[in-house]
Structure formats: C-alpha cells, structure tokens
Image (cartoon, rainbow, N blue to C red):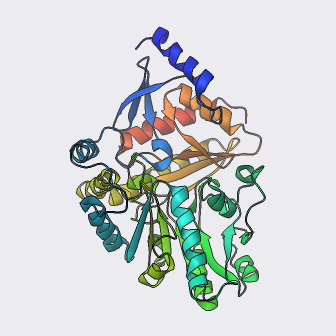
C-alpha cells in the first residue's frame, strides 16, 4: 500500500476515532515474529508486544491454527452452556497455578473487578458485612473500569472520574510498615502487582510479597495478586509471584494468556468458590470457545518452545545490555530495572521520555513508557538475542544524542 493510500486511513482516524490515544501517523498492516510492517512497507522491531500481550509474537503458526480450527467449529455459546476448550483451559490453568477455580472474562480490568467483587462478597456471605476495605498501592495500575480504577494508585488515571466507591486505601509500594498501619478489622483484602508495570517497572522488594501473605493471614484478610502483566511466563516464571514462593488466595490473568486474542481470568482457591453464586457475577463472552482454544494453544507453545526458561535467560541478557547503556550514558540514564522480559531504563529527571520514545520509534523500534520516565521493554517471548541487541543499539544511539 502506498503513502497515497495510507492518507485516507489516517483521515478516517482523525475524523472518527475517539481521540483518547496518541498514535503516531502510520498504520500497521502485518507482522511476523517480532517484526511489524506498516501500510507503506516500513519495518518495525516490536519490543513492546502490545504492552506485554503478544506472547508468541505475530502470526505464530500455533496461534493461527488455533484461531482457524476453532472458528470453523464453534465460536460462542454463552455461559449458559459448557464448551470443551473452556473446560480444558480451566483445568490447565488450575493445574499449572495450584488454584482450584477459574472464572473467565475478556480483559485485565474485568479480571481485577472479579477479584474485588470476590473479596467483598466472600466476607458478606460469611456475615462479616463490615469487612469490605481493600489495601492497594500507590502507583499501582489495575485497570480503567470504575472498580479497577478505585484500586489503581496512579493519580493521572483517576483524575476526573470520582467520586469512587469508598473502601480502598492506598499505601506506598514495598512498605510493609505502611501496610500494617493501614490494616484493620474492616479489611477484606490486599491487592498487589509482583512488578508495577505501568507504575514504572518496579519489582516488589525482596520479601515484600511474603510479608503481605503473613499480614493477610494474621488479620484474616485475602491476598489478591494482579498478574495481568506479569503472568504467563513474562518474568521467567509462569507467574510473577512464583519468584517469591508465595501462594495467593486469588489471582488475575489476561494479556499474555491470549497472545493477542482478548481473554481474562480470575483464579481462586476452593474456599472462595461459594462467594459468587449464580446471578452474582458474569461475562457474556467470558470463556468462549475461540478465546479458550487460543489460550490452550499459547500454553502448549510455552511448553513446546521452552518460553518460561527463555524469558529468564533472555531477560538476564537484556538486563545486562540495558545496564551497559545506563553505565555509558550516566547523564541521561538513572538505572535499569525489571524482571525477566519486563524491563525498563529509567531516565533522569528533565529528560523527555515521550520524546525519546518517539525518536526510537522513528528509527524502527517500538517500546512503551512505564510510568512517566522509564522506557519499557516487554517484547514477545519469542524474541531473539539478535533482536534485543538491535533494539538496545537503537535506544543507545538515541540516548547518545541527548545533552547530558
């Protein structure tokens, strides 16, 4: 497609898309592996994977086959009836995570809404109606629906959408003392991300998740873990909190589970199964056969291609490469951080991270921001070391041109 043909598409965007995003002026058309091409044929190296979504990259044969096969058989029947792929997926996820029950939805926001409703109704059903408050963390991101947004700790996402339903207390991430101080007999749950991705790619400090487990146990509250961005092998373990050898009461999954096909899941322990009886919560498309078949194919590909181990190995490789960039550019880079293939270079105050992101993109490498000052790397798990080298080199070349 030529530039002449691309312009009408951009005109449609300008005229009809709701203007709540800041897309650059090109139109992506196709992809393979970690490469994307726009409608004018320009190639981009995808090191963001649709914000940690495209686990298998683009046009992966297992993904394509799963979509084609299941679409030719059965796509949607609603939750009034069982379907085979969804039952198999529920079994696989529970087997792999040690959880007992699975509820399916369409997104991370919905999965976190399910966590919130589960926690509150669990105590309601036990007659503990005063127990509804949730402890969440500053700079956390749990989604954009109003319930998930109430738990989100980043002010810029909350501004203008209040007042929120009460019952959420935000404390500093990683501060065990602040959590203990905020606890009370009215607390139903603590919700936490193993790595704060949108907050700037900050891993939980060593021992923090274990401390949260202990606090929840001491006070009879639930521990909810948001694995929307960190789950499904992203950090070099199946789940981000597996690094800490902690067991949650319930977890939220989405993003990488569908590798580009919308799906979300809330997994919980058997003790929480009675909390949401029929009629209390649902999702029309949740657990549909097509999404479930794709997620099963993603899990099989992770096994067949050793992508958990690959994320750990290539994450360490990327970490070392980013550390060299930071050391070489001390005037503009503050640090590198992250876990597995969710990593970031934190830029120093005063450096325009969004402008840097744009210059990197103009040179053919796609990243996202984590927080306001960090360049976030969340490539497909199938990324090669050569592709990581290519991306890091482009970032380094842009940073080298900045005044220090």
Residue 327: percent from left, percent from top: 60, 47
Q: The C terminus appears in which quarter of the rendering?
A: top right
Q: Is residue 383 above or below residue 138?
A: above
Residue nearest the observer in this picture, 180 or 361: 180
Report if residue 360 is visible in the image: yes
Q: Residue at x 62, y 85 (%)?
A: 215
Residue 187: percent from left, percent from top: 68, 81
Q: Quadrant of residue 90?
A: bottom left
Q: Quadrant of residue 179?
A: bottom right
Residue nearest the observer in this picture, 172 or 9: 9
Residue 81: percent from left, percent from top: 31, 63
Q: The N terminus appears in which quarter of the rendering?
A: top left
Q: Is residue 357 above or below residue 100?
A: above
Q: Residue at x 52, y 26 (%)?
A: 363
Report if residue 194 is visible in the image: no
Please give left or right for residue 340 compared with residue 294 in the image.
right
Residue 319: percent from left, percent from top: 50, 52
Q: Residue at x 72, y 32 (%)?
A: 403
Q: How many marks?
A: 0
Q: Name, please, the residue furthest toward the top.
A: 4
Please give left or right for residue 367 compared with residue 314 in the image.
right
Please give left or right for residue 62 compared with residue 350 in the image.
left
Q: Is residue 44 above or below residue 186?
A: above
Residue nearest the observer in this picture, 237 or 62: 62
């Amino acid at each position: 497609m030529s530039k002449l043909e691309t312009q009408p598409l951009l005109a449609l965007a300008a005229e009809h898309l709701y203007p709540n995003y800041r897309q650059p002026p090109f139109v992506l058309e196709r992809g393979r592996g970690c490469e994307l091409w726009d409608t004018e044929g320009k190639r981009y190296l995808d090191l963001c994977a649709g914000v940690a979504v495209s686990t298998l990259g683009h046009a992966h044969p297992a993904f394509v086959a799963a979509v084609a096969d299941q679409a030719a058989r059965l796509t949607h029947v609603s939750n009034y009836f069982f379907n085979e792929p969804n039952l198999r997926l529920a079994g696989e996820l529970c087997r792999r995570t040690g959880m007992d029950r699975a509820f399916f939805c369409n997104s991370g926001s919905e999965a976190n809404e399910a966590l919130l409703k589960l926690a509150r109704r669990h105590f309601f059903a036990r007659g503990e109606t005063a127990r509804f408050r949730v402890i969440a963390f500053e700079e956390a991101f749990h989604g954009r629906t109003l319930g998930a947004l109430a738990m989100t700790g980043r002010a810029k996402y909350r501004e203008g959408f209040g007042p929120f339903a009460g019952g959420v207390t935000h404390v500093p991430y990683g501060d065990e003392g602040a959590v203990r101080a905020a606890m009370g007999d009215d607390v139903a749950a603590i919700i936490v991300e193993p790595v704060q991705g949108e907050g700037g790619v900050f891993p939980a400090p060593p021992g923090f998740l274990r401390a949260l487990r202990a606090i929840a146990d001491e006070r009879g509250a639930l521990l909810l873990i948001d694995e929307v961005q960190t789950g499904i092998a992203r950090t070099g373990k199946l789940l981000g909190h597996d690094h800490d050898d902690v067991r949650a009461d319930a977890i939220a999954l989405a993003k990488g589970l569908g590798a580009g096909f919308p799906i979300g899941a809330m997994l919980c322990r058997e003790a929480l199964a009675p909390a949401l009886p029929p009629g209390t919560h649902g999702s029309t498309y949740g657990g549909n056969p097509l999404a479930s078949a794709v997620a099963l194919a993603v899990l099989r590909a992770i096994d067949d291609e050793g992508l958990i181990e690959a994320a750990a190995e290539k994450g360490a490789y990327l970490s070392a490469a980013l550390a060299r960039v930071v050391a070489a550019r001390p005037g503009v880079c503050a640090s590198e951080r992250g876990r597995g293939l969710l990593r970031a270079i934190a830029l120093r105050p005063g450096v325009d991270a969004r402008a840097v992101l744009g210059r990197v993109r103009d040179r053919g490498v796609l990243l996202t921001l984590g927080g306001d000052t960090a360049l976030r790397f969340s490539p497909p798990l199938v990324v090669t070391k050569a592709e990581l080298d290519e991306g890091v080199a482009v970032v380094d070349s842009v940073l080298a041109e900045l005044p220090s």
